[in-house]
Amino acid sequence: MGTGHEPGGEVRLHVRVNGEVREFTAPLTVAGLLQQLGLADRPVAVERNKVLVRKAEHATTELADGDQLEVVTFFGGG
């Protein structure tokens, strides 16, 4: 999977999120991904290429073309 260059100079990333390949504009961090997925304000666990990404590192962990992520949301209830 190569990084795609769109007209106008945009670089596109192909990232597998929970088994589904999705396309995003680079650069993109884990925090930016969560924002785009509508999960920024929710408690989540994120695994990037089989390594857990701590919440404190979401804003500084940049994604690369071909990354594989698992995003798990937590729900309260009773």
Image (spheres, rainbow, N blue to C red):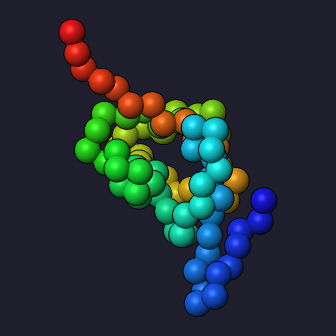
Q: Residue lying at the far right in this picture: please name it.
A: 1
Depicted 31 relative to depicted 18: above or below: below
Q: Residue at x 41, y 51 (%)?
A: 37
Q: Nearer the viewer, residue 54 or 67?
A: 67
Residue 16 percent coordinates (x, y): 63, 47
Instruction: Report the number of numbered marks.
Output: 0
Is 12 on the left-hand or right-hand side of 61? Answer: right
Quarter of the image containing the N terminus? Answer: bottom right
Is 40 on the left-hand or right-hand side of 25? Answer: left
Residue 68 percent coordinates (x, y): 64, 43
Q: Residue at x 55, y 69 (%)?
A: 26
Q: Residue lying at the far top in this picture: please name it.
A: 78
Judge whether residue 59 can be spotted in this image.
no
Q: Nearer the viewer, residue 21 or 41?
A: 21
Q: Residue at x 65, y 59 (%)?
A: 14
Is 3 on the left-hand or right-hand side of 11? Answer: right
Q: Residue lying at the far left in this picture: please name it.
A: 78
Judge whether residue 55 can be spotted in this image.
yes
Residue 21 percent coordinates (x, y): 65, 50
Quarter of the image containing the C terminus? Answer: top left
Q: Nearer the viewer, residue 48 or 36?
A: 36
Q: Nearer the viewer, residue 5 or 27?
A: 5
Residue 30 percent coordinates (x, y): 46, 51
